């Protein structure tokens, strides 16, 4: 007697996205110091027909939501969890910027652990040296800040 094959949640997600005919989903990652470059990359990826998810908050900029240190720490934890969910949802990851700090390195490691292909606006900062080649047309110079 054969047993039905059980699918992982990730396999169900891939099948559901295919069944819905969704375009490629790209998670933009990187230091929030590159928020302007992320916006430009978002525009470029969207114009190329991809769905983009990316950080929505730049906690380095003052804001009432994270003005209190205790609130800021709790929010940072929630945002980190949310961003990991965006990486799991994505088909690939785009690292923006010419600097890889601890948080971005953690995102790269998480994406790699989840089998996500990774592209870089600045391939020279790839800590593993196995970045995907640029997509057709490459990353425009104005995004490579």
Image (cartoon, grey):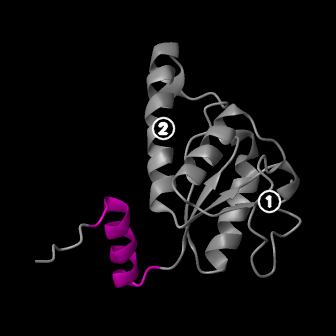
In the image, what residue occupies the spot 66% across and 80% down? Answer: 48
Residue pushed farthest front? 1
Percent coordinates x, y for residue 89 in the rendering = 45, 60
Left-right relation of 129 to 114? right
Magenta highlight on residue 9: yes
In the image, what residue occupies the spot 51% across and 22% down? Answer: 72
76 or 122, nearer to the observer: 122
Magenta highlight on residue 35: no
Left-right relation of 140 to 103? right
Vertical comparison of 64 with 28: above or below: above
Span colored in magenta: 7-22
31 or 103, nearer to the observer: 103
Residue beneath label 2, please? 79
Percent coordinates x, y for residue 139 in the rendering = 80, 69
Vertical comparison of 43 with 19: above or below: above
Q: Most prominent secondary structure in the magenta stretch?
A: helix
48 or 67, nearer to the observer: 48
Q: Which mark is residue 121?
A: 1
Q: Residues within 10 Å of mark 2 (few under 14, many from 20)?
A: some
- Disc nearer the start of the sequence (1/2): 2
């Amino acid at each position: 007697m054969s047993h039905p094959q059980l699918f992982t949640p990730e396999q169900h997600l891939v099948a559901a996205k295919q069944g819905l005919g969704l375009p490629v989903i790209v998670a933009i990652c990187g230091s929030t110091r590159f928020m302007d470059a992320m916006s430009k990359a978002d525009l470029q990826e969207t114009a190329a027909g991809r769905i983009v998810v990316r950080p929505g908050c730049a906690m380095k900029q003052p804001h009432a939501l994270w003005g209190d240190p205790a609130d800021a720490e709790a929010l940072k934890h929630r945002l980190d969890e949310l961003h990991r969910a965006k990486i799991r949802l994505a088909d690939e990851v785009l690292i923006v910027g010419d600097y890889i700090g601890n948080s971005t390195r953690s995102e790269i490691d998480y994406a790699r652990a989840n089998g996500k292909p990774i592209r870089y606006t600045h391939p020279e900062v790839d800590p593993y040296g196995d970045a995907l080649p640029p997509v057709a047309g490459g990353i425009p110079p104005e995004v490579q800040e």
